[in-house]
Image (tube, rainbow, N blue to C red):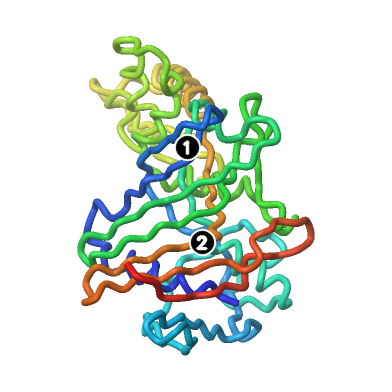
Amino acid sequence: MRPPWKPVLEHAIHANASERAAQYVQLATVKPNGRPSNRTLVFRGFFPVPDIDLDLLPTPTPSMTNLSSGGSSTNIDHSIPAPISRSSSDSFRQWGSSSSLHASRGETLAAVKLNTLLEFVADIRSAKIGEEWSAGKVAHAEVCWYFPQTREQFRLAGTLHMLAPPNSPLVQSVLPPWAPKDVDWEAERLRLWREISPSLRASFSWGPPGRPFVEGEQLSKLECMLPAEVAPSALTADATAAGQDGVVNLTVSSPSPQHPAPHTVAQSRSTKEQQLIKIHDEALSHFGILLLDVEFVDHLDLKTVPQTRMHYKVRVPERTWGRISGLDWESKRVFS
């Protein structure tokens, strides 16, 4: 069934859309030496899937445990607006790009499960990447997310997965074992790469995170990923319309005293283009995505009196090949 916590979280995201601080979360993990590790990340959205035919799914009937009445279960009405719509991606090649999804129940369940994965971007050279995916280690993590306008806090715990560049010598992708084999993970990595800001893309071409700082080293790369004005006045950079590889194309204005003759421009353009492509490819090779597969959610609403605290727990959190788990949830209200 559809996880009952997801529309609640989507409502909080929508209600706090004007609050810049609401896009930041704290992601906590445990280092190999047992010490805690925490960092602030920007939430990039849920893993996008084509439109889902929800008629193929059972209607969720979440229940909460009434602690004050001896633990009896009653149905509750979350009264949550429809989930925020999001455009589909090319991640599911076999499902095409039609506006409605005519898929089997199994494909629909897979899409629902994938659409609960929280996405964050990461530099695969970062020390935290090596810490989380050491040999044979399952990466567990918890996100703490506060929404100031609606005074809500969400804690989402689960398994952390890594989507790395293909053939990366630094780290290999560690993907959800239950995910369909047809998912084009690289298409999703490139989609997020195109969505982040030019300055953030440029930062992936700098030195490895945590390495001693070299004065002025990154200054030569501040403009490398900008979609415009990356070259002298004779040259204008513009990202390709298709955006498949993010390579910057350069267009030339007509010759003038301020703009060199065509052959001179062509020579300059070639040099600049090669430089941009080289830096772009280097930055993209360091770009990865963190995927949080949620298994437990603690939602605290501070507006109500008394405060409302809900626990959402997946009944079967095990991850096995060929089986989609994490679709059966239990909900209960607890003391705050």
The amino acid on which the numbered mark 1 sits, given as a three-letter code, is: Ala
Q: Residue at x 66, y 65 (%)?
A: 316
Query: Residue 74, position in %: x, y?
Result: 47, 89
Q: Residue at x 50, y 21 (%)?
A: 274
Using the image as rendered, state which of residue 100 and residue 109 is in the foreground.
109
- Residue 122 numbered tag: 1
Position of 119 relative to 2 (above/below): above
Query: Residue 42, position in %: x, y?
Result: 37, 47
Query: Residue 37, position in %: x, y?
Result: 43, 35
Q: Residue at x 27, y 26 (%)?
A: 233
**Location of the C terminus (image quadrant):** bottom left
- Residue 296 numbered tag: 2
**Location of the N terminus (image quadrant):** bottom right
Q: Is residue 299 left or right of residue 128?
A: left
Query: Residue 225, position in %: x, y?
Result: 40, 32
Using the image as rendered, state which of residue 77 and residue 203 is in the foreground.
77
Task: Residue 333: name its quadrant.
Answer: bottom left
Using the image as rendered, state which of residue 180 and residue 249 is in the foreground.
180
Pointer 2 with pointer 1, Cβ within 8 A: no
